């Protein structure tokens, strides 16, 4: 018999957190059962072996064909469950009722296209990582479901408000398989989830945030990673919402100054170790410059650089 749901997990060298993730998925108490499908794009750290040992179905694809949107679309086509869970390889569900809670809005309201879970930082996350995650919509404790009842009014909202309403996060999300087959993710190196959320709102569908469904997920802050992520993210925000957080050089200077001051205050209050203090200035510069450069390049129609 086909399972009720399939958890799709794209993986590339995910051995560090994969055992905990797979163990949490195997422990889910979900009526109808949960299939686990790992899509591996060239791991060299034993991830495929770990997945198979945990009882997951494994689909191996070439590294060059991996794409944030298309890889998840592939998982949706290959899945046997009528409900789909998408999880990043390092997002570990909390509790045996995680899947049931995350899927619940899709089951109770046919208008809801997708749902996403709350993210909590790892126990060893530094103070700046905790602060950054705490500022993201997927960290709040209040549930919500966003619909667009008046298209003209929605399009007239400020860019930041439209972005907030359209938020959807594939770190841990749920979508009906039939919905995904009809409305697949776009091919994308970054941000396929927020584009899909915006598209679903404009199509009259709803996006639910389910804080009762929790995953433990955070990344150590590194200047290079912050720069690339912010560059890609703010190109996307400029394209989808005409949102420019740092529109020009004077704003960039102010963002670096205010961001640096905020980082130091956060580190002081948390009494983080010296290593965090030494790394913070480069991270501040990288984060702000990535935001500025991404928005600027999108506005100017420049091609994506090779490093992105």
Image (cartoon, rainbow, N blue to C red):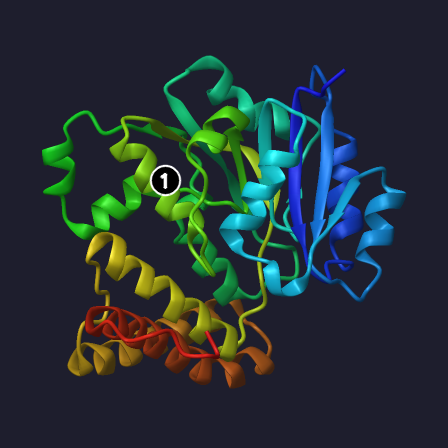
Quadrant that contains the N terminus: top right
Q: Is residue 53 left or right of residue 131?
A: right
In this view, 179 is above or below 19:
above
Residue 210 visible (yes or no)? no
Residue designated by label 1: 197
In this view, 101 is above or below 54:
above
Q: Report x, y in % for residue 304.
A: 38, 74
Residue 258 visible (yes or no)? yes
Q: Report x, y in % for residue 305.
A: 41, 79
Residue occupying image coordinates x 33% and y 34%:
200
Q: In this view, does 145 lie to the left or right of 253?
A: right
Quarter occupied by residue 239: bottom left
In this view, 59 is above or below 100:
below
Residue occupying image coordinates x 61% and y 65%:
64
Q: State the residue in front, 17 or 75.
A: 75
Q: State the residue in front, 304 or 141.
A: 304
Residue farthest toward the right in the current orientation of the protein: 53
Q: Is residue 164 left or right of residue 50?
A: left
Residue occupying image coordinates x 31% and y 65%:
235
Element at label 1: helix
Q: State the residue in front, 144 or 61.
A: 61
Q: Report x, y in % for residue 228.
A: 45, 73
Q: State the residue in front, 235 or 23.
A: 235
In this view, 90 is above or below 143:
below
Quarter occupied by residue 287: bottom left
At label 1, counting other C-alpha atoms closer than 10 Å, the crowd grade (few under 14, some 14-19, many 20 or more) is: many
């Amino acid at each position: 018999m086909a399972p009720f749901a399939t958890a799709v997990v794209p993986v590339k060298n995910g051995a560090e957190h994969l055992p905990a993730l797979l163990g949490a998925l195997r422990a889910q108490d979900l009526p109808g059962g949960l299939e686990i499908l790992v899509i591996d794009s060239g791991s060299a750290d034993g991830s495929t072996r770990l997945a198979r040992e945990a009882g997951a179905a494994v689909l191996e694809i070439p590294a060059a064909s991996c794409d944030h949107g298309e890889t998840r679309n592939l998982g949706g086509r290959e899945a046997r469950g009528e409900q789909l869970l998408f999880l990043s390889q390092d997002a570990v569900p909390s509790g045996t009722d995680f899947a049931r809670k995350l899927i619940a809005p899709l089951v109770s309201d046919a208008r809801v296209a997708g749902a996403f879970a709350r993210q909590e930082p790892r126990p060893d996350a530094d103070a700046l990582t905790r602060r950054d995650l705490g500022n993201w919509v997927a960290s709040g404790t209040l549930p919500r479901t966003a619909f667009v009842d008046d298209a003209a009014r929605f399009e007239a909202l400020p860019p930041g408000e439209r972005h907030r309403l359209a938020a959807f996060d594939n770190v841990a999300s749920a979508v009906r398989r039939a919905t995904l087959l009809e409305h697949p993710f776009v091919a994308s190196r970054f941000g396929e989830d927020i584009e899909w959320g915006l598209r679903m709102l404009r199509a009259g569908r709803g996006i639910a945030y389910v804080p009762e469904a929790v995953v433990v997920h955070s990344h150590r802050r590194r200047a290079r990673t912050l720069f690339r992520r912010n560059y890609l993210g703010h190109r996307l925000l400029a394209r989808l919402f005409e949102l420019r957080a740092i529109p020009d050089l004077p704003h960039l200077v102010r963002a670096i100054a205010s961001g640096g001051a905020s980082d130091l205050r956060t580190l002081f209050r948390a009494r983080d170790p010296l290593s965090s203090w030494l790394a913070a200035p480069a991270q501040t510069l990288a984060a702000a410059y990535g935001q500025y450069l991404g928005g600027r390049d999108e506005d100017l129609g420049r091609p994506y650089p090779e490093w992105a």
